Image: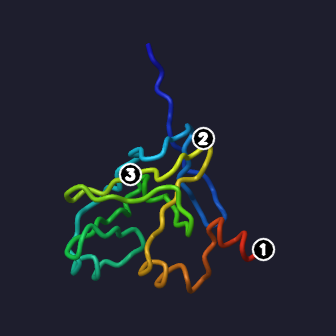
Amino acid sequence: MTRWKPRYAIKRTAIGLGFFTLNPIPADKRIIEYIGLILTKEEADKKGGKYLMTIDEEYLIDGSPRSNIARYINHSCRPNAKAYRSGVRMWIWSIKVIKAGEEITIDYGKNYFDDFIKPIGCKCAKCVKKSNK
């Protein structure tokens, strides 16, 4: 009998919780799907929240349920992964080799950055390292 081994872990980071790989991930590899209810832009504007991922000009995914462990992927100004659309689904893919134990990060984009991150200051590894110089 083969024993199931977890591939990811949710761990504490400087900014809350983060999504970490337990195994190395090669570049250009699909990691995880960002899941949740699909909302129209109008519904998303009414609901608000920080876990909304844009699919296109009309639709977004509400990734707020805790069953969506991809919601723990934090922003980085120097990310190691990227979100790609396939129909109405959003997938997170590695854009470079990610080492075992490393946090998986994506760039949330200018709008999210300006609305949520910039007012409190970016805490990603690149920006923290730059501010400590």
Q: Is mark 1 on a helix, strand or loop?
A: loop
At a point 46% along the width and 84% down the height, the residue shown is 115
Quarter of the C terminus within the rendering:
bottom right
The residue closer to the viewer here, 26 or 2, is: 26
From the image, state whether disc 1 or disc 3 is nearer to you.
1
**Closer to the N terminus: mark 2 or mark 1?**
2
> Image point 31% across, 57% down: which residue?
90
Q: How far apart are marks 1 and 3 (CA)?
A: 36 Å
| Drawn side of residue 69 relative to residue 132, left or right | left
Q: Residue 51 carries which label?
A: none
CB atoms at circles 1 and 3 under 8 Å apart? Answer: no
Q: Furthest-right residue in view?
A: 133
Q: Residue 67 carries which label?
A: 3
Does 15 sit above or below residue 102?
below
Mark with earlier residue (2, 3) = 3
Disc 2/disc 1 C-alpha distance (Å): 26 Å
Given the image, on which type of amino acid does mark 2 rest? Ala
Q: In which quarter of the image is the N terminus?
A: top left
Q: What residue did someone put label 2 on? A: 100
User: Based on the displayed image, in which of its 4 quarters is residue 49 positioned?
Assistant: bottom left
Q: In the displayed structure, would residue 133 be above or below residue 37? A: below
The local crowd at label 3, few if under 14, some if 14 to 19, many if 20 or more residues have their Cα within 10 Å, is: few
Label 1 sits on residue: 132
Please rate how many residues cluster around mark 1, counting C-alpha atoms within 10 Å: few if below 14, some from 14 to 19, many from 20.
few
Determine the CA span between mark 2 and mark 3. 23 Å
Left or right, 41 with respect to 84, comes to left
Q: What residue type is labelled 1?
A: Asn
Mark 2 lies on a secondary structure that is loop
Provide residue 84's location: percent of width, then percent of height.
33, 58
Q: Which residue lies furthest to the top in this view?
A: 1
Mark 3, secondary structure of its residue: loop
